[in-house]
Image (cartoon, rainbow, N blue to C red):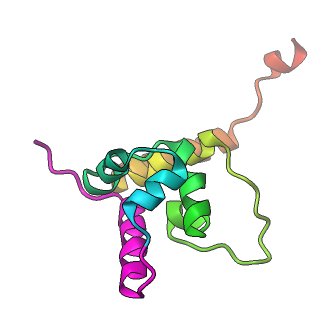
Amino acid sequence: MENLQESPITIRLNSLLEGRRKKGNPTSQKALAQAVGVKEGTLSVWLKDNKPFPSDYIVPICSYLKVSPTWLLTGVEQEEEEINLPLTADAIQVATDYDLLDAYGKAEVAIAVKKAMTKTPDKSAESA
């Protein structure tokens, strides 16, 4: 069986749950699973077997644990004065998928995004 590297999202979530256990404020997998509406076994697979979290569950998980989706997805907490726009399910899925890429894949995505951002609009499409 393929040995997958644990995703940064899984690492952050496991670290958060472990930190709470050490501080005497445990959040059980069972309680978290119930709060987000999945079976405990499903959550366990996500946390232990490095299975990607469906994007629909990122926001409920963050709400229950009182952390921002930005922190869970990127490891960076937003400054308070930043605009906190809700992330769409597509945006969360893109961030989740990006998080699983190796350095080469991330570099390829960066190149593709730069190309897409600098493209000039097709003149023939504008006149249609």
Location of the N terminus (image quadrant): top left
Is 107 on the left or on the right of 115, as rendered? left
Quadrant hosting residue 68: bottom right
Span of residues in magenta? 1-26
- Residue 120 % position (x, y): 74, 34
Residue 24 is one of the magenta-drawn residues: yes
Quadrant hosting residue 128: top right
Q: How many numbered circles are shown?
A: 0
Query: Is any atom of residue 85 visible in this view?
Result: yes
Relative to 106, say whether 56 is above or below.
Answer: above
- Residue 61 % position (x, y): 53, 57
Is 35 on the left or on the right of 107, as rendered? right
Q: Which residue is depicted at the point 25% across and 50% down? A: 49
Relative to 62, say whether 66 is above or below.
Answer: below
Q: Which residue is depicted at the point 53% across and 54% down? A: 35
Q: Which residue is depicted at the point 51% across and 60% down? A: 73
